[in-house]
Amino acid sequence: MKSDASLKRVAPPLPYAPRDPARSFRIGLIGCGDITKWHLKAYRKAGYSVVALCDIDPARAAARRRRFYPQAAVYSDYRDLLARDDIDVLDVTPHPQERAPILEAAIDTGRHTLSQKPFTLDLDFGRRLVRRAARKGVKLAVNQNGRWAPHFAYIREAARAGLIGAVNSVHMSVHWSHNWVVDFPAFNRMRHLILYDFAIHWFDMLHSLMAPRRARRVYASFTRTPGQAARPALLGQAVVQYDDAQASLVFDGDQRIGGQDRVFVGGDQGSLTSLGFHRAPPKVTLTTAAGAVSPKLRGKWFPDGFHGAMGELLCAIEEDREPSHGAAENLHGLALCFAAVQSAETGKPVAPGSCKRLEKRWLRPVTS
């Protein structure tokens, strides 16, 4: 291992951690499903002000209020929350089908908005939302919280800083059980749970590493294991081709013992790797001609990724710029995801952007 002086020379400090704005913003949360405990845990830790909570089941909103923000108001109709004049930013979390009209209404009130991922089921509708937000002066971002997982955030920033030169390859693999969905019917009925709902994090990470380059084609597949408990297929993989680079994503969602989470980014002047397991902070290693170093990183994906997603939106509002996870940018990662789903269904490579929407039959509940 290198000395501290060598570490700073080879792997300088990078802005991988979540950022916070200087001023305070008042946040309204619409949708209080299970994932929102991580939103609220992150916001409370960051000192953010959540003034209103809404859910069609008011008991769920009340439970979130008791645990995280006792002074927040509770609503069962999002339109009542939107009618308030003291909310600066909205966090909209329902599933895409229910979320679409909420996003339209939120934008029309002029509130800056963080949308849960996946952003939309239709790329053209997503573009219309982007244009609608631009007309209203609204900053619309997507909660791609994986971007602020410490290991991935450091890798991204190191690559952007040119520490490994031009990126030639990206290979990411996740090997751990996704059978937890048996307790959540909405996910357990999702045909493309892995390549759509889960892998969207990794497609977004891939795009954020490769931008502004655009992929030429995606080839993907999915299947079940004999012993998996979940109804959707838990094995999925995708190969992504660029003009001058390649990438692969592998998801083994039924690996119940001895799991692993791995990232490899190869450049013409070095490489970046991370190796860990599930939510534990993976070890990151930067290797160049000067040697190999492993910077000590702070934080975990859960809840720090949620802190990063909201914090970046708040900083973008304060600094009057587009957030790095803005909806327009997010559509490129979503195009990779849609292409992968179509490829898995047809057995053929698909050009990103040619699949405009996920067909209903691809989203239908699995029956076996």
Image (cartoon, rainbow, N blue to C red):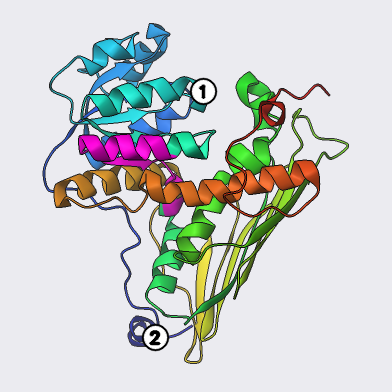
SS at circle 2: loop
Which label's residue is closer to the chain start, 1 or 2? 2
Q: Secondary structure at mark 1?
A: helix
In the rendering, at what x and y percent does residue 249 appear?
Answer: 66, 57
Label drawn at residue 117? none
Residue 128 part of the magenta-drawn span: yes
Q: Horizontally, is 210 left or right of 199 in the view?
A: left
User: Which residue, given by chain and number where applicable, does mark 1 sit on?
Assistant: 97
What kind of residue is marked 1? Gln
Above or below, 72 relative to 299: above
Q: Which residue is located at x 37 percent, y 75 percent?
A: 161
Asked if 118 appears above or below 203 in the picture, the reply is above
Instruction: Residue at the far bottom: name it.
Output: 289
Side (left or right) of 243 relative to 345:
left
Q: Main secondary structure of the magenta part?
A: helix
Reply above or below: 311 against 298. Answer: above
Image coordinates for residue 303, horizontal then vertical, percent: 40, 42
The answer to whether residue 59 of the structure is visible from this angle is yes
- Quarter of the image for residue 108 reads top left
Estimate the x, y position of residue 270 in percent, counting from the top left: 53, 83
Q: Residue at x 27, y 51 (%)?
A: 322
Label 2 belongs to which residue?
A: 3
Look at the image and give the residue range highlighted in magenta.
Answer: 127-147
Which kind of residue does numbered mark 2 sit on? Ser
Q: Quadrant of the C terminus?
A: top right
Q: Residue at point 62% right, 39% down? A: 196
Q: Does residue 223 appear left or right of residue 99 in this picture?
A: right
Q: Position of residue 252 (x, y in %)?
A: 73, 48
